[in-house]
Image: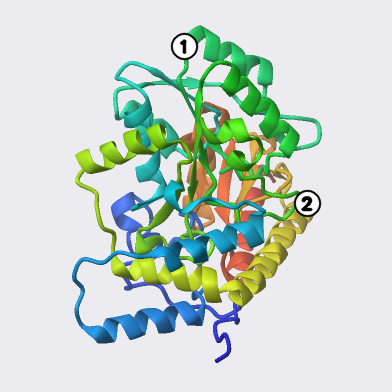
Amino acid sequence: MAERNLDFDRVIERRNTRSLKYDFAVEWGMPEDVLPLWVADMDFKTSSYIEDALAERVKEGIFGYSEVKTPYFETVRDWMVRRHDWKPQEEWLVKTPGVVTALAMAVKAYTEPGDAVLIQLPVYYPFSEVIEDNGRRVVNSNLYRGGDNRYHMDFEDFEEKIIQNGVKLFLLCNPHNPVGRVWTREELIRLGDICMKHDVIVVSDEIHQDFVFQGKHQVFAGLKKEYEDRCIVCTSPSKTFNLATMVLSNIFIPNRDLRKRFRKQLDAAGISQLGVMGLIACETAYSMGEEWYLAMLEYVRGNIAFVKKYVEENLSGVTMTAHEGTYLVWLDFSGTGLSETELEERIVHKAGLWLDGGGMFGESGKGFQRINVACPGSILEEAMKRLEKAIKETCG
């Protein structure tokens, strides 16, 4: 049996499929016919092996409580070893309905109401939400864009914020959403050493670990033995294989006490067995989906190169941040002279596009837009042409 779903140019009609990306524009205050490149799911069919495995399971017709045994873990572990040179242990694994769920559970498990939790804005907006909604304080150490057009960490400010606020927990995003950085080994070790020095637990969101186009993904727990004892690593097949609705993530917590405290919060939230379809999809993805994954990765790489070239040649006043990881491109519109409100108005109503406005990722994200490029090239080309027209009408 061969992989069938390798035609990434194929445009698949997703409207009227209960798609959050396509079917809820009006409910979210957008024009009904807007072209969506916002939420982080792909417009590609997943691996045909996953399709077939799910179809076979449906034929059984019984969907009672389900769990997995050691072969599931071995499949996940082998992917981590093969793709990321990291060998987790079976007892470290805790499955959750998603990475955001895991972030929230970690905040509840490792801090008390009123405690400070550190993040680095601009960053994926649920980071702030799971802190604030659980009655903790957001402390921010801003990333900054250097002369190399890449974002960097301010290590002095980072440590100062920990000391000043008595920070107990840090939420790391690697690869980084939305700025596209793949943090280097040296950067992560410098960061990790600061956290270890001040007894800060690190929650490392590595959901985009399989989308690296420059550099190499470094699993935080694999950098130093001492990091294992003070971190949790959040992974999932959902981004890699377009399985968000399968609602499954694999969370690795090497330290027994941290794992026990985390599980207690899951129990308190009433979270136990996950859906059988997600378990099957994950195991099939990591055991049989590599051909699809590698082909998809190269296609997305081409889309990123297309956007970079298009922006440089056609979008006056717009800059694409140097891109290393994720399929989410970070565009700087500050050179257009438009305010945040004007920019949103032009993109939505002139270009007819639904992107993610940078302000949702924090104050330092204002003037930027995040665009999802994991779609057929024809859709991406249409989006860029619309954007060009709207910008030219604006800036002359």
**Which quadrant of the figure has residue 62?**
bottom left
Find residue 166 and name its label: 1
Horizontal side of residue 263 vs 231, given as left or right: left
Up the image or down, 189 lies above or below 163; here it is: below
Up the image or down, 294 lies above or below 90; here it is: below
Residue tagged 2: 312
Q: Residue lying furthest top in this view?
A: 164
Find residue 323 and name its label: none
- Residue type for callout 1: Gly
SS at mark 2 in the image? helix
Which one is in front, 357 or 92?
A: 92
Horizontal side of residue 54 vs 227, given as left or right: left
Instruction: Write the residue at 49% across / 82% down.
Output: 48
SS at mark 1 in the image? loop
In this figure, what is the number of numbered marks?
A: 2
Q: Earlier in the sequence, mark 1 or mark 2?
A: 1
Position of residue 75 measured from the top left corner of the image (x, y, whole percent): 51, 66
Position of residue 229 measured from the top left corner of the image (x, y, whole percent): 52, 32
Position of residue 169 measured from the top left corner of the image (x, y, whole percent): 46, 25
Inspect this view and state whether residue 33 appears: no
Position of residue 86 measured from the top left corner of the image (x, y, whole percent): 62, 51
Question: Could you classify mark 2 by the number of other residues whose Cα lies within 10 Å: few (under 14), some (14-19), or many (20 or more)?
Answer: few
Instruction: Write the residue at 55% across / 33% down.
Output: 122
Q: CA distance from mark 1 to mark 2?
A: 44 Å
Up the image or down, 292 lies above or below 188; here it is: below
